[in-house]
Amino acid sequence: MVSSSSKPSPFAVKILIAGGFGVGKTTFVKTVSETTALSTEATLTEASCDVDDLAGIEDKTTTTVAFDFGRFTVDDQVTVYMFGTPGQDRFWFMWDEIAEGALGAIILADARRIHESFAAIDYFENREIPFIIAVNHFAGAAEYKIEELQYALDIPPRIPTIIGDARDRESCKYMLVTLVDSLIDASTSSATPWPSPLTHAP
């Protein structure tokens, strides 16, 4: 008979929803969070016109100035707490504070503005924080193969790369589960390029 004490204790996972300006981070957190997502959006004004690149996202009217926050339960053992990062360069000084204690990240990308993802990829690679790439589907965006997207982003095939839709809850859940699975794999495999992030999970 297996003792109930041998059952793994539930733990919380802090992850970041990251990426460049206007890639869908706030939409993602609001879509998948089980609770009302905390959002710190502010209205874009004319003062930002010379600072923020709105090419391809001309309809965008708000921006995150601190972070977004939401919660998602994977199963009875894993609860994910999501922190969406601000996208504009002038708010990047906040990333180090938000990233403290994070076990991994979902980097959202826009195939129409792929260059917006380079800085986020560099950030997490330099800090050895595991991440996956989720290419958010936008109307009018051309369709690409995963291999083409990885080449454009200059990332190796070992980095999980998927295509999804931040407006669709099931798609967002799939992105989260993909990241959690990669974190679990990293904690059990000696072949992983990442540290073992779940080893010290509470």
Image: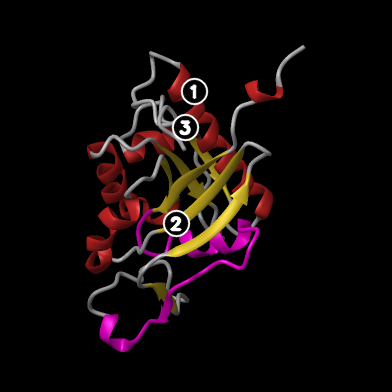
Per the rendered image, the range of residues in magenta is: 19-48
Mark 2 element type:
strand
Which of these two is toward me, 115 or 8?
A: 8
Query: Which residue is drawn at the image coordinates 73% and 15% (left, top)?
Result: 2
Mark 3 element type:
loop
Q: Return the disc, 1 or 2, that comes first in the chain's sequence.
A: 2
User: Whole-Å distance between the Cαs marked 1 and 2?
Assistant: 22 Å
Q: Quadrant of the N terminus?
A: top right
- Displayed quadrant of residue 52: bottom left
Query: Which residue is drawn at the image coordinates 36% and 45% (left, top)?
Result: 101
User: Whole-Å distance between the Cαs marked 1 and 3?
Assistant: 12 Å
Q: Label 1 belongs to which residue?
A: 185
Does the segment drawn in magenta span residue 144?
no
Foreground label between 1 and 3 = 1
Residue 160's label in the rendered image is 3
Which x, y percent locates residue 14? 46, 47
Q: Would you say 47 lies left or right of 29 here? A: left
Which x, y percent locates residue 104? 41, 40
CB-based contact (under 8 Å), mark 1 and mark 3: no
CB-based contact (under 8 Å), mark 1 and mark 2: no
